[in-house]
Amino acid sequence: QLQLVESGGGLVQVGGSLRLSCTASGFTFDYKAVGWFRQAPGQEREGVSCINSYGDNTYYTESVKGRFTISRDDAKNTVYLQMNSLKPEDTAVYYCVAGHDDMLAGMSGVAIPYWGKGTLVTVSS
C-alpha cells in the first residue's frame, strides 16, 4: 500500500519549534519532489514548502521564509520540515506530499499524486 505518514505535530507556544517528519511506505522518494501543504480552519489549502528530487532547490511560501527549513533523507525515505519561531497563524493541518519537480514552480498549480493524511500543528499565544 502506498502511504505517506506524517508525525511531529502537536501543541507549541508562540516562538517555539517543531519538526515534522514524513516517511513513505510502498514507494520511494527517488526522483520525486517532496513537500508540505497546510490548511487552517476555514481557509484554503496552501503550499508551504517543497524540495526537488535532487535536493538542491527549495521553495518556501513567503510567510515562512527564514523560519521553516525543508530537508530530505532519501536513504530513510523521509522528508522533514523544521519549523522555528512559530506564530499563531501557522496553526493548521500539515500534509506531506510527493510528486514531480514541477512542484517547485508553483505548488498549487500542479497535479500531486501522493498525499499524507496530515498532522495537526497548534500554536498557542
Image (cartoon, rainbow, N blue to C red):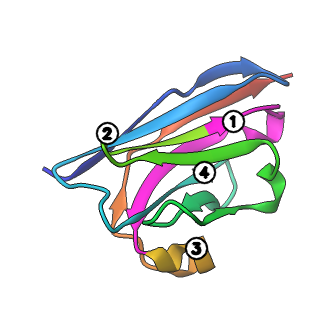
Residue 42 in the image: x percent, y percent? 68, 52
Residue 77 within the magenta-colored segment of the rendering: no
Q: Amino acid at mark 1?
A: Met
Disc 4 secondary structure class = strand
Please name the residue shown 71% across and 37% down the image. 91
Q: Residue at x 84, y 24 (%)?
A: 14
Q: Name the residue tied to disc 1.
A: 83
Please indicate whether residue 73 sits to the left or right of residue 69 in the image: left
User: How far, Cα to Cα, is label 2 from label 3?
Assistant: 22 Å
At horizontal 46% and vertical 42% (from top left) the residue drawn is 118
- Nearer the N terminus, badge 4 or badge 3? 4
- Tell me, yes or no, whether the highlighted magenta stretch contains residue 93: yes
Whole-percent x, y for residue 53 in the image = 43, 66
Q: Quadrant of residue 122?
A: top right
Most extreme residue toward the left is 1
At label 2, the amino acid type is Lys
> Helix or strand or loop: what does disc 2 sit on?
loop
Which residues are drawn in magenta? 82-100
Disc number for residue 76: 2
Q: Which residue in the structure is indicated by mark 4?
A: 38
* Residue behind mark 3: 104
The quarter of the rendered structure image containing the C terminus is: top right
Q: Earlier in the sequence, mark 2 or mark 1?
A: 2
- Which mark is nearer the camera, 2 or 1? 2
Of the image marks 1 and 3, the number of the one nearer the N terminus: 1
